[in-house]
Amino acid sequence: MFSHIMVGADDVEAAKVFYDAVLGALGHEPGVIDDKGRCFYFTPTGIFSISKPIDGQPASHGNGSTIGFAAKSPEEANAWHEAGLANGGSACEDPPGERTGVAGTLYLAYLRDPSGNKICALHRVS
């Protein structure tokens, strides 16, 4: 459904450290910085990227927005969460764990990245 997702960051290098850690915990390669100073994470199913806002204004998070990353297991989601906390992220929502709803049982872990963007590692239990 999605070709790419881009988030804004005032400090792309600091964001790269954070995302290299959390995405590395999910098995992804470190991001690549292009000649415009943007950072890209390429996967077979899409691209995640970080950029300073092109309008020159400070980066800000989308209130009510969450970007979810697929985790292969609850353990991988926990490693993702721990890597994020150790690399400039902050915990938000409930602690990592199972939640049941219309989508079935999911194992979820939430963080805010250094720019305040809300992200989640999700493992589908059932």
Image (cartoon, rainbow, N blue to C red):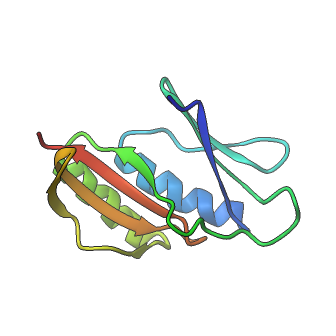
Q: How many marks?
A: 0
The residue drawn where x is 40% and y is 71% is 86
Q: Position of residue 105 (x, y in %)?
A: 13, 48
Q: Using the image, determine if residue 109 lies above or below residue 106.
A: below
Q: Position of residue 70 (x, y in %)?
A: 34, 42
Residue 71 lies in quadrant: top left
Q: Position of residue 100 (x, y in %)?
A: 14, 55
Q: Taking 120 as reference, is 71 left or right?
A: left
The residue drawn where x is 20% and y is 47% is 102
Name, please, the residue furthest toward the top.
44
Q: Using the image, determine if residue 60 lies above or below residue 53.
A: below
Looking at the figure, which quarter contains the C terminus? top left
Report the front residue among 32 and 52: 52
The residue drawn where x is 50% and y is 66% is 64
Q: Taking 56 as reference, is 106 left or right?
A: left
Name, please, the residue furthest toward the right.
56
Q: Position of residue 25 (x, y in %)?
A: 35, 50
Residue 115 lies in quadrant: bottom right
The residue drawn where x is 22% and y is 65% is 96
